[in-house]
Amino acid sequence: MITTRALTKRYGRVLAVNRVDLDVREGDRFGFLGPNGSGKTTVVRMLLGLVYATSGEIEVMGKPVPSRVAEVLPRIGALVEGPSCYGHMSGRANLALIDASGRGRGLRNRRQRISEALERVGLAGVDNRAVKKYSLGMRQRLGLAAALLREPRLLILDEPTNGLDPKGIREIRDLLTELNQAGTTVFLSSHQLSEVEQLCTRVGIVDRGRLVLQDDLDALRAPTGRVMVRSPDADRAAALLDGHLEQRDGDRLLVAGADPAELNARLVAAGLRVSEIGPERRSLEELMLAVTGSGSDRIDAVRTAVVRPAVALAEAAGPGGPAGAAGPGPAGTPAAEHEQRGAQAAERRSGGDWSVEREARGAHASDRGSGAAQTADRGSGGAQAAGRGTAQGQAGRNSEASGPDGDSGTDAGNRTDAERAESRQGAESQPGGENTESQPPRESQERRKGWDSGERRKGWEGGMAGSALGFGQGGKGDSAGEGRGSAGGEGEDKQ
Amino acid sequence: MIRVELVKLVRRPRSWVSIGLLCGLPVIVAVFVAVTHLVPPPGQGPTLLSAVLSNGSLYPAAALAIVLPIFLPVAVAVVAGDAIAGEAGSGMLRYLLARPVGRTRLLVAKLIALVIYTLTAVLAVAATAYITGKLLFGSQPVAVSNSGGGATPTIIAAHAAAASLSGTTLTPADIFIRTVGAISFIGVSMLGVGAIALFLSTLTDSSLGAALGALAALVTSEVLVTLNAAGVINPYLPTRYWLAWVDFFRQPILWRNIDRGFAVQAIYVVVLLACAWANFATKDITS
């Protein structure tokens, strides 16, 4: 029904959609999920021929888009980024006008089709008041009615339940299910997990422009192979299951590789009470959080890290070079790491509510790598930003290579899960072109003023260079990146 | 699609309010002139106004001269600026294009609606002014000036007023034909304004921005027309020949500036519409 191959859209330097291969089959109820700003709407607009792809192919109902989009659009009902109408006209007049626009069926059964569409979305009794007096929910229903006017074979809906109350959401869900059973393919773009979870049969998850996952919902929510047990006698159960117990959270135990029935029998035989038992399933929410970063609607104060490109390493060792940079550096030593975290926490706090997630992410990603630089920097006041940027570039490289499901933290085995996730986020912003931004320390802010993006760009390349060195080498790589970054910082100071 | 665009235009209160205001201003002027019999001294104030006192059937021309400098361009720029940007701003553009309405078709439909609006506005002004003139000033034979060659339009008015001695007399049929000529000339000039605004309308999602941009272009042109230092580009400015339609009321008609005016406007219209089309047809619709 919808096939895209390596679909890419670039707006200037921002890569909005990055090589997306969608595959929506006839009869699917396809949920297109992603955080805000992850490129969902851009994909939808490209499917409808509103936005032209930078590269890649789209095929909708067997016709190439946008070259022959006019042939398929009459059979598509669309709701893109909320409904729109002419506010000074009534709902019916709006539908009539939309229906009259473009080629297609004429006046004959227009009235009837409008009435049917209004009835389907629950606006049958709507009067002649102007649409501008409608509530948000009514407009949403009207937008849906417009999409349903010509009995589409494919419905492309972007956030169709926006502004509806729970009952309305339920109605729309039932309506979509009913239409789907009558043969309409539904492509539903949303960031509301519950909506997708309850309606869709297949999901695609997009994050920062990339399709990170596409599969049947049932397959995604298949049992993980672990069994979840809840027991008031958790302590004794844990002791009994020693070896198989994977995780414990209060009275909640996760047991590896067991059959729930058998496990239950075993626990009960041992005289333990079981209040809840069953195979563990990943919820869509867990899945989503695992594969995506935070949405782009969260805009944190971005301070740019500027790194000079590969300045000769020798320079770092030259006179006046920061003490830490010349040596192997205390990267990864517990003390350095500790300090680094403390500094981050302080910076986050000072950022207030709109605190600095992106940069914090970057900082996290570069946590270990920059630790040394930062420590060293306390004295030299120059190289800190550089070290961080470099280390971030490196982290980015790592996780980029390891893929969306991969673990970017492999070079830092003792990181916590959260840290890993965050470093991946920082990393995956790399293809988006925003990667040069990280979190340089305050004291060097003045120094950065007036630096142009060209230099930042170089900095990023420098970071990449550092990362190329460091990639795959674990802790060693960190040191390399750091050393180079410090050198860069030093170079700037001389400027 | 053209029909749909016309329906939108007709059902839009703004269309009628703007035309009403356009017609209202000459009526107000006519009432004051008729009551006081005070007209601007020949050579000052609105063109042809001084000639109106003796013959009301010249009033349509005078009325157009009153609305031409500001009112009419504003109305046209607002409607044309709203054409694409308005749809984009209200979010309807994406739904129209997904309907599907071809982008070229939509642009053509908007253009035709714009032309019809412009003609309606000009004709409405002329018609109300004719009625007003007949009622308030009556009609006597008109004497127009012999063409004075390089005379500026405002001086023509002076001639017209003082021409009862030396000017030729125009028959009502003559006045009618000349008025039709003037109306079509003004219509084409306004189409030039519309083309500027329509092009800007494809560039932005703000109809206000597009309309103001077109007006800014006109003001710039007006300033440069009066500036001797800008003499090099003077003949190519969009407003340079705007008042050339007054030449229709000379005897014989002085075609030189009229022809040039038509030519300049035609070039602006063609070039800007081509730009509008090229931009709109390849644009990413992100509104």
Image (cartoon, coloured by chain):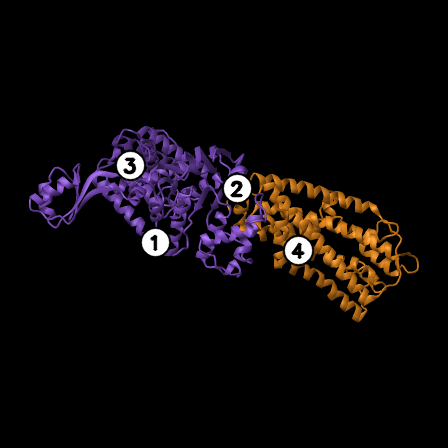
Q: Which mark is residue A74?
A: 2
Q: Chain of mark 3?
A: A
Residue B94 appears anywhere in the view: yes
In the rendered structure, find residue A369 and report the number of the disc placed on it: 3
Q: Regarding mark 4 in the picture, which secondary structure is present there?
A: helix
Q: Residue at x 57, y 43 (%)?
A: A104
**Label 1 vs label 3: CA separation?**
27 Å
Q: Nearer the viewer, residue B158 or A309?
A: B158
Horizontal side, residue A261 vs residue A438: left or right: left
Residue located beneath label 1 in the image? A353
Can you tell which quarter of the image residue B51 is in? bottom right
Say yes or no: labels 2 and 1 on the same chain. yes
Closest to the camera, between mark 1 and mark 3, is 1
Q: Give how far across and how far down residue B54 sits, in percent.
A: 86, 64
Q: Residue at x 42, y 37 (%)?
A: A26
What hue does chain B carry in this figure? orange
**Secondary structure of residue under mark 1:** loop
- Tell me if mark 4 has few (under 14), some (14-19) or many (20+) residues whose alpha carbon lies within 10 angstroms of its own: many
| Residue type for callout 1 | Asp
